[in-house]
């Protein structure tokens, strides 16, 4: 089986994007892992499928698979690459595109200067919606690990996120604490673990340990979750520049009941064909 694909990246968070409309395709977990392998396959953090919509008002369905083969419902950097892909491939010429996901619909908008804004939807803070195995909602929770007690915020952006406030992201124990918390019993669907350093009320530094992918250069939904957590705690303004290892995102959130907006770039790296 030969598959045409496009390698793309959003702030270094890289993807293999496949048109599953014009080339019907169904991959096994092993084949997804092979494609994501950086030594034997193409190499990526996530694999993205462009599929036919399931809703009357949508143009496409957006599906996301982690490098380990697990399917997830949300990826913000991937959403921007998805928008760039369907525009560049001539699948849509609209300035705003509505897409279905397993979590919710997303609105993807092309801005001046080539940037793309994604309406990431309304964040969920209730434990059952995240999901988080605690009885009561709080702005901050605590968990005991071998390294000591960790205080964190929890937010769902269609996928579960933990946000830990740190003094310095460079020295933060992202790999160790991230790996421990990703699969902790508090998170029945696992979780993405963000480490946030506040520079001022309009700027933060962020590193994210993503479930199923380990640390990546950028995580769009993680940036949204971090800003929401910071605003909820009264630490950040409504528009924040998020500095990630791979680049910058602008995240805006007016408050409860309203969607989070994420603006950033998306770039095509190369086109290819692979035989599975």
Image: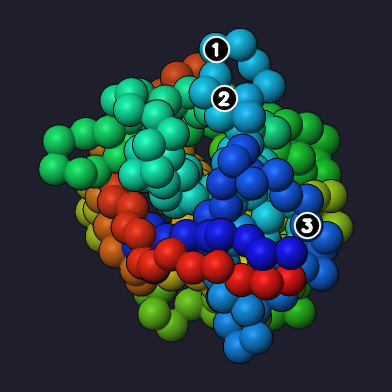
Measured from the top left, where is residue 77 in percent x and y?
44, 51
Mark earlier in primary sequence (1, 2):
1
Instruction: Pick whichever, 269 or 264, lies toward us.
Output: 269
CA gap, disc 1 and disc 2: 10 Å
Residue found farthest to the left = 113
Colour mode of the rendering:
rainbow
Pointer 3 with pointer 1, Cβ within 8 A:
no
Residue 39, above or below 71:
below
* Residue 44: quadrant of the picture: bottom right
Measured from the top left, where is residue 226 in percent x and y?
46, 49
Q: Secondary structure at mark 1?
A: loop
Residue at which label 1 appears: 57
At horizontal 73% and vertical 49% (from top left) the residue drawn is 25
Q: Which mark is drawn over residue 27?
A: 3
Label 1 crowd (10 A; few <14 / some 14-19 / many >=20) = few
CA gap, disc 3 and disc 1: 27 Å
Measured from the top left, where is residue 154 in percent x and y?
62, 45
Pointer 1 with pointer 2, Cβ within 8 A:
yes
Mark earlier in primary sequence (3, 1):
3
Residue at which label 2 appears: 105
Instruction: Pick whichever, 162 or 64, lies toward us.
Output: 64
């Amino acid at each position: 089986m030969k598959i045409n694909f496009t390698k793309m990246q959003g702030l270094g968070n890289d993807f293999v994007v496949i048109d599953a409309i014009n080339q019907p395709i169904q991959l096994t977990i092993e084949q997804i892992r092979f494609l994501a392998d950086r030594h034997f396959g193409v190499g990526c953090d996530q694999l993205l499928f462009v599929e036919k919509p399931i809703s009357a008002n949508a143009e496409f369905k957006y599906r996301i698979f982690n490098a380990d083969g697990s399917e997830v419902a949300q990826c913000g950097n991937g959403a921007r690459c998805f928008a760039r892909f369907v525009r560049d491939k001539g699948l849509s010429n609209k300035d705003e595109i509505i897409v279905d996901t397993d979590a919710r619909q997303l609105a993807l908008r092309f801005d001046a200067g080539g940037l793309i804004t994604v309406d990431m939807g309304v964040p969920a803070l209730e434990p059952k919606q995240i999901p988080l195995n605690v009885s009561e909602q709080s702005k901050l929770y605590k968990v005991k690990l071998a390294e000591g007690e960790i205080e964190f915020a929890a937010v769902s952006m269609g996928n579960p996120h933990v946000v830990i406030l740190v003094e310095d992201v460079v020295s933060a124990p992202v790999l160790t604490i991230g790996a421990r918390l990703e699969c902790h019993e508090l998170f029945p669907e696992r979780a993405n673990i963000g480490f946030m350093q506040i520079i001022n009320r309009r700027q933060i530094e962020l590193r994210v340990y993503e479930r199923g992918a380990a640390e990546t250069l950028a995580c769009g939904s993680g940036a949204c979750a971090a800003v929401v957590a910071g605003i909820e705690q009264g630490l950040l303004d409504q528009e924040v520049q998020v500095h990630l290892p791979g680049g910058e995102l602008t995240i805006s959130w007016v408050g409860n009941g309203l969607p989070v907006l994420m603006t950033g770039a998306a770039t095509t790296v190369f086109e290819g064909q692979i035989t599975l």
